[in-house]
């Protein structure tokens, strides 16, 4: 394993900060700048679509289409980065807090999750970009029906 330059570590950390903040602020243009043209996505552990490759624009559009009324707060910690032949591999823990501001039913007005993300990063257009995202869900709690990515449609999980 080759050591990672400290400036690359800082730059990749910044990409992740911008990526997660883009979710929270629904800043789809900012999210797309964090992604490579093609991205491998694996959210299977949280009951979402099967793993596969899609364009960065398609990934963003799927998140945009997951219309919900949730206020979100993404946090990550324990970022580990290592240089590999295909780029830089990253792993971090995550905590996603989700609250429904418009919740008018009975029951819980939140749906939270925690686990780990595995990322791959590559250089494109002179900047680090996310080329692979794998979510390894540990636990979720609260009202599952609030989260568009976990709602079932015709017996299948919705794509979000």
Image (spheres, grey):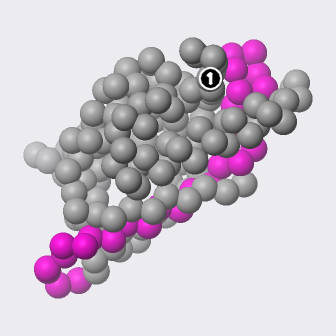
The front one of 100 and 18 is 18
Q: In the rendered image, which quarter is residue 6 located in?
A: top right
Location of residue 143 with respect to 106 vertically, above or below: above
What span is colored magenta in the figure? 79-107
Q: Position of residue 104 (x, y in %)?
A: 14, 80
**Residue 31 as seen in the image, left or right of residue 61:** right
**Residue 90 as seen in the image, left or right of residue 101:** right
Residue 95 magenta: yes
- Residue found at x 20% / y 51%: 67
- Residue found at x 34% / y 49%: 26
**Residue 119 as seen in the image, left or right of residue 81:** left
- Residue found at x 30% / y 42%: 63
Residue 57 visible in the shown view: yes
The front one of 25 and 156 is 25
Location of residue 30 with respect to 147 vertically, above or below: above
Quadrant of the drawing holding the N terminus: top right
Q: Position of residue 160 (x, y in %)?
A: 28, 43
Q: Where is residue 28 in the image (x, y as percent from the top left)?
A: 34, 39
How crowded pointer 1 is (Cα within 10 Å; few <14, some 14-19, many 20+) is rated as some
Q: In the rendered image, which residue does mark 1 sit on?
A: 127
Q: In the rendered image, which quarter is residue 53 located in?
A: top left
Q: Main secondary structure of the magenta part?
A: strand
Residue 7 magenta: no
* Secondary structure beneath label 1: strand
Residue placed furthest toward the left: 154
- Residue found at x 40% / y 71%: 141
């Amino acid at each position: 394993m080759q050591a990672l330059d400290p400036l690359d570590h800082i730059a990749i950390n910044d990409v992740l900060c911008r990526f997660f903040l883009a979710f929270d602020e629904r800043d789809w243009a900012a999210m797309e700048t964090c992604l490579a043209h093609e991205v491998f996505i694996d959210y299977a552990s949280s009951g979402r679509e099967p793993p596969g490759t899609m364009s960065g624009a398609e990934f963003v559009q799927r998140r945009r289409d997951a219309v919900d009324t949730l206020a979100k707060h993404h946090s990550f910690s324990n970022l580990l980065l290592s240089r590999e032949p295909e780029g830089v591999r990253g792993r971090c823990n995550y905590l996603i807090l989700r609250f429904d501001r418009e919740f008018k039913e009975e029951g819980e007005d939140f749906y939270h999750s925690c686990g780990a993300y595995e990322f791959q990063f590559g250089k494109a257009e002179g900047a680090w970009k996310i080329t692979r995202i794998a979510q390894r869900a540990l636990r979720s709690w609260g009202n599952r029906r609030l989260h568009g990515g976990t709602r079932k449609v015709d017996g299948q999980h919705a794509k979000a």
